[in-house]
Amino acid sequence: MPRIQSIHSCSRSMASTVATLPEHIEHLRVSSPEEIAQLISNLGSQLEPQLPGELPQAYLDSLSDADRTVCYCAARILYATREGKFVPQEMQLRAIVADKNRKHINVTAGTGSGKTLPIALNILLDDPSKRLITITFSPLRQLQASQKEEFESHYGISTAVINDQTPKDSEWWNEHVWNTHDKKPGKCRHLIITVEQAFRSREGHLPPLYLLLCNPYFQRCVTRVNIDEVHCIYTAGTTLYGVPAFRPAWGRLPEIQAILPYSTIWAYYTATLPPHIHSMLTRTLLTTDNFVNIFVTSNRPNIIYATHRLVKNMDEARNYRCFVQSPFQLSTQPHVLIFVDNLNLCNRICNYLCQTITKSHQNQDVIMHYHSQMSDDYLKKAHDEFTSSTGKCRVLVAASGQSVGVDFPNVEIVCTVGLPPTGVDAIQRGGRGGRKPGSEALFVIFYEDWVESINLPDYLAPGSDLVDPDRPRSSLKSSANRRERAPYSMVKIVQEDTCIRHQLNIDYLNDRS
C-alpha cells in the first residue's frame, strides 16, 4: 500500500506524519465539514504552482453543505493519491455527488476527459469496513489490463480482471473475489469484467461470475455497476440491419440490472451517445427517473478532420507511404495511429511501412501492429513502445476494435482505412489523437473511389430506419461486402461539402456546444 505524505491535517496527531492511504481517507471520513473545507483552502496556498487548474468554485457554491463536503473529500483524496498534480473537474464531481446521493449516472464525455477518475474516487469514498464491491464492465482485454494498472498504481485500489483468461480454480476466486465458505468478499474491491463472463456460454458452461451474480449474499455487496463504453450495448449487442449481434452479451446487461438489488447504483460512461443510441438506452437501462445526465462535449478544437480518396483501393500499400517521413528520422517522426478493419491488411501495411524506413531502424519496433490475435505480452509491449516517452514505436497499425478506450496519449495523426462502420467508430478513432495537453492532431478517413458513386437518396427508401444515421441502403447478410455495408453517415461525410466537424458533432451527436 502506498504511503502518502500528509500535507496538512486538522488533527495534531496527523500533522507532519506519513500516513497510509487508508489512514488518510479514514481521517477525512471522520473530519467535520469545516475541517475538510480548511484542508482544501490550504492546498491552493501551499502547492498552487503544481496544480494544473482550480476546483470549479461556481459549481461548489451551488451545492448543499453535505454535497460540497463530498466534493472536498474527493478533491483531498485525489490530491493525496496523485501527489498534488490533479484536481477534479466539474463533470467528475457531478458524477461523485450523484453516486453519494444514490442516483444512477449517465456520463457522456469526450475521449480524454477523465471518465475513469469518478469511478476510482467513488470506490475510495466507500466505507472500507462495509467491504463493498464495485463492478465495471469493460469491452477489451487490453483495455482491462491498462485499467487495472491505473486503479492499482495510481489509486491503490485492489482490482481483479475477469475475462476468458481468468483462473477458474476456487482458490483464486476465494482469495480475490468472493469467499464462498465465509460468504464474504475477497481482497479485491473492484472487479473489471468482460460482459460474456456474466452469462451462460453458448456451450452451456457456467462462468464463476455468473454463479456469483445469482448469489444473494454476493448481490448485497455490489454497491455499484459501471458500464464503460456503454454505446456497445447498441453497436455490439444488438441485431442491426439483419446481421446478428457479434457480442450479444452486451445486449443482455438489463438482465443483470434486473437481478441485482434495487439499491445498486448503475453508472454509464461513453464519449459517443448519439440520439438513436441514447433512445435505446432509456428503453433498456435508464428506465427510472432516478438518474443524472452529465455531458461534456467531444468536439475538441485541437483535432483537424479530413477525408482522402485512396489510389486504386485500400489494398494498395503505397497509399500509406505518406505516414513515414522521408528521409526517416526517429526524433522527428510523428506518432501515427492507423486503424484497419481487416487483420491481413493490418499486417501487410505494417510490413510495407517497415521496408520504407532506414535499415538501421528496421526490426527495432519502430513500426508495429496491434490486434487481438497477438499475445497479451506483445500487445503490452506494443502499447508501451508507442506511448512511453522512451519508446521507439512511431507508427502503430491497429485493428479497429482497439479504438475503444485504450489510451494513446501522444498521437499526432490518426487514419482510419476505409469508411468507419458507424459515426461512433469514427469519433472514437479520431478521439485517440491530440490527447496530450497543448497538442494538435489530424484525423483522416481514407476511402475508396466507389464511395463517391453511391446514390444518397437510396438511404431514404421506404422501410429505412431514418432515425439511425448509420443505416445501410438495405438489409444485410453476414457476408455483405464493404460497399453494401457503407453507412449513410459516413458516405454523407465524403460526398457533401459540409464541414466534417459539423457533421460528426451537430448532425450525428446532436452536440451543439
Image: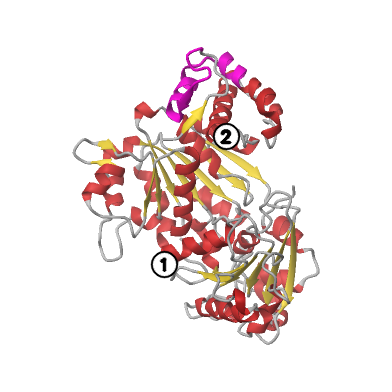
In the rendered image, the vertical position of residue 22 relative to residue 329, given as above or below: above
In the rendered image, the vertical position of residue 173 relative to residue 182, given as above or below: below
Q: Nearer the viewer, residue 487 or 434?
A: 434
Inspect the image, locate mark 1, and give the three-letter code of the amino acid beneath it.
Ser
Q: Give the main secondary structure of the magenta stretch.
A: helix
Provide residue 224's location: percent of width, then percent of height.
43, 38
Outermost residue, bottom side: 312
Inspect the image, locate mark 2, and give the three-letter code of the amino acid beneath it.
Glu
Return the residue at label 1. Answer: 375
Which residue is found at the position 47% from the left and 30% from the top? 125
- Write down the region rendered in magenta: 12-39
- Mark 2: give few (<14), some (14-19) or many (20+) Cα within 10 Å: some
Provide residue 456's location: percent of width, then percent of height.
71, 75
16 drawn magenta: yes
Is 136 left or right of 441, judged from the image as shown? left
Provide residue 52's location: percent of width, then percent of height.
68, 37
Q: Which mark is residue 494?
A: none
- Mark 1: give few (<14), some (14-19) or many (20+) Cα within 10 Å: few
Return the residue at label 2. Answer: 83
Which residue is found at the position 67% from the left and 68% from the top? 330
